[in-house]
Amino acid sequence: MPTGAMQDFIREETESILAACTKCGKCFEACPMTRYSPALAGAEPKAVVTGILALLREEGNGPEALGWASVCVRSGSCVPACPDGVNPKMMMRIARITASGGLGGPKRIAARHDRDYFDRIRAFAKLQLTDEEIRDWM
């Protein structure tokens, strides 16, 4: 569990996100990973973002929010999609930490302990992305 300055940073970022987010769902719509969670099939973007914000308040347990938090790979595609100046990438990072019990709450998703996970994602992405997308995302 983070201590001291890290806890303060997470708390401040969470408060900022909760205050600024209008739950428009644009970040969810921009995310390239949403199709990889069965919990997100047919999900309403605004409802999923509302669930993520509830998770940040440590009040949420919605399967859609947990599904999105578990598949997010921090591509950053969501950042330019936000019309409200929120950093959805940070929002999802905090949601994932919260959902995995990293802030002392209950563990609602499994933490990944696969050291090669992100290397495999990068390798797989290089097979499908253009050179410009690789420069922007990786």
Image (spheres, rainbow, N blue to C red):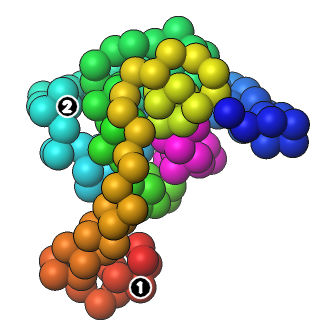
Q: Quadrant of the C terminus?
A: bottom left
The magenta span reads 82-95
Amino acid tagged 2: Leu
In magenta stretch: residue 89: yes
Q: Residue furthest bottom?
A: 131
Q: Residue at 16% across / 45% down in the picture? A: 35
* Spot occupied by residue 38 in the image (x, y as percentages of width and height): 13, 33
Cα separation between marks 1 and 2: 28 Å
Q: Which residue does the numbered mark 2 point to in the structure image? A: 40
Q: Residue at 28% across / 24% down in the picture? A: 64
Label 2 environment density (alpha carbons within 10 Å; few <14, some 14–19, many ≥20): some
* Spot occupied by residue 13 in the image (x, y as percentages of width and height): 72, 38
Q: Which residue lies furthest to the right in this view?
A: 4
Q: Residue at 19% across / 38% down in the picture? A: 37
Label pair 1/2, CB-CB below 8 angstroms: no
* Spot occupied by residue 120 in the image (x, y as percentages of width and height): 26, 70
Q: Along the line of sight, which residue is nearer the eye, 12 or 132? A: 12
Q: Is mark 2 on a helix, strand or loop?
A: helix
Residue 79 vs 66, above or below: the answer is below
Amino acid tagged 1: Arg
Q: Which residue does the numbered mark 1 point to in the structure image? A: 135
21 with respect to 127 (left or right): right
Image-quadrant location for residue 6: top right
Residue 16 vs 81, above or below: the answer is above
Image-quadrant location for residue 109: top left
Q: Along the line of sight, which residue is nearer the eye, 104 or 9? A: 104
Residue 114 vs 95, above or below: the answer is below
Decide which of tag 1 and tag 2 comes sooner along the chain: 2
* Spot occupied by residue 99 in the image (x, y as percentages of width and height): 47, 27
